[in-house]
Amino acid sequence: MSKFKCKIEKSSIPIILILVIAAIMRIAVLSEMNVDYNLASDDLSYINSAITFVHTGQITMHGVLSAQIMPGMPLLLAPFILCFGTGTFMWMGVKALWILMGLLSIYFVYRIVCLYANRYYGALAAFFFLSIDFAWMDNLILTETPFMFSFILLIYLSLKLGKTQEKKYYWLIIVTYIFCLLIRPTIAPYPIFLFVYLYFCKYDMKLMFQQILIAGGILSCIIVPWTIRNYIQFDAFVPLTYGMGNPKLMGTYQGVGFPLDKDLDYEKNVIANMPKEMKHYYNNGKWLDHYMSKYYSLELDGMKADYRMSYWWEHDKKSMLKSYLIYKPYGMVYNSFYWATPFNISDDINMLFRKVDLFLCFFATIGILLNRRRIKELLLIASFYIFQIIVYSYSFSFSRYAQTLYFIRYIIIGMGLYELWQYLLNRKKKQQIIKVND
């Protein structure tokens, strides 16, 4: 009888332990909060949207025909509803998938760092996922977990393409990007940043332009039907989603010195300027019971946001600049998406993780800049991170959005601290050589 031996390298033990601990944390939270735990908010709306999609083929949100979301979530959830119905087994299956995606996110951050550093630095990057807010997030049926997983995978594949220029990574990038885009449209500008990165990697430009055309054609086959559907339903050009006006409006209540509603005249400066089509669904402060009312209500939020921002700028530029350039970006950098306290674990532990990772990220960035070998990789991930912070700071600085971006700092920590260590070693060797020559 043959014996099978599984040899685990010593350097792999840290990441194995991290993944095991992360899995235990997520399962423990699942047990503590119950399998059907939800916020009775967007998460429940996604489930209901998937149920409606299975029965009617329509994409809805909050109970009405909608393009407020991309079709990714209903498509992702629909198979579980088809197989298990809408009871406990459906929740178990979906939660298992979400936990799996959370664990894969940790693993691929580890793999990204291991492209440029040893496994211990990869494990260090993965370690920061052991904060309880990530375990709690992976137990919520929101876009955060699948978006973060696909975003991490997209970065991994991008770096592999830049490093190897193998075509298989190009095709995998297209698939991953489409999946990510169908979950959350904020990923849309990513190809621009990827193009710049590949240029610095000395990628074959002729091949790149050919691949851009092919990718554009494939993407069009997904987006164009969705855009046509939106035009037919809402009589408006909506290539991805609508509803940006709502977070933009909420963002005007963040920071310091923002206008108070009692000082504003919405009736004169907003309601009176409503387009005729919008007024048809708006009657004496009440919206008609029609799916277009939801669309126009979010458009009205955008009009209110523009009015509030113009008033704010006119009356207190200083506080508005402070809010949009300091306070709101700060919220995207130092925050925690953690609205419950499983096992009575307070949010303080999460904020400790944030403090440590910000501190280490600072020195890691210095390490990359000093050693210079990973400048282009830093350019790709850090520039897109900053871009996302700017976008959300302009609209709504929210812990949910911030949570899915922290992994970029973890990657920088793993790569950068390794580069800093290599820089110090090389500098020490040079000093020793100089002493010998002297």
Image (spheres, rainbow, N blue to C red):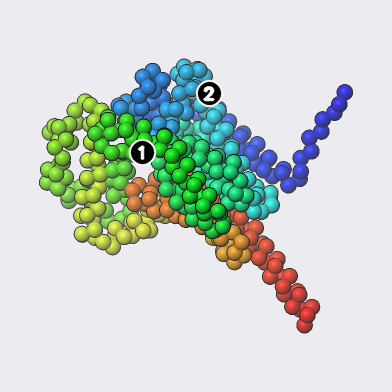
- On the image, which quarter does residue 298 sit in? top left
Residue 193 locus on image (x, y percent): 47, 52
Which quarter shows the C terminus?
bottom right
Mark 1 — residue?
A: 240
Frontmost residue, 262 versus 6: 6
Disc number for residue 1 = none
- The residue under the point 55% across, 32% down is 99
Q: Amino acid at mark 1?
A: Leu
Earlier in the chain: of badge 2 and badge 1, it is: 2
Q: What residue do we see at 64% from left, 41% from top?
A: 18
Q: Which amino acid, mark 2? A: Met
Q: Secondary structure at mark 2?
A: helix
- Helix, strand or loop at label 1? It is loop
Q: CA distance from mark 2 to mark 1?
A: 30 Å
In this rendering, would 352 be left or right of 256? right
**Is 39 placed above or below 402 here?**
above
Residue 336's x, y, as percent? 46, 45
Question: Left of 23 or right of it: where is 296?
Answer: left
Residue at 47% over, 28% down: 76
Mark 1 Cα-neighbour bin, 10 Å: few <14, some 14–19, many ≥20? many
Residue beneath disc 2: 92
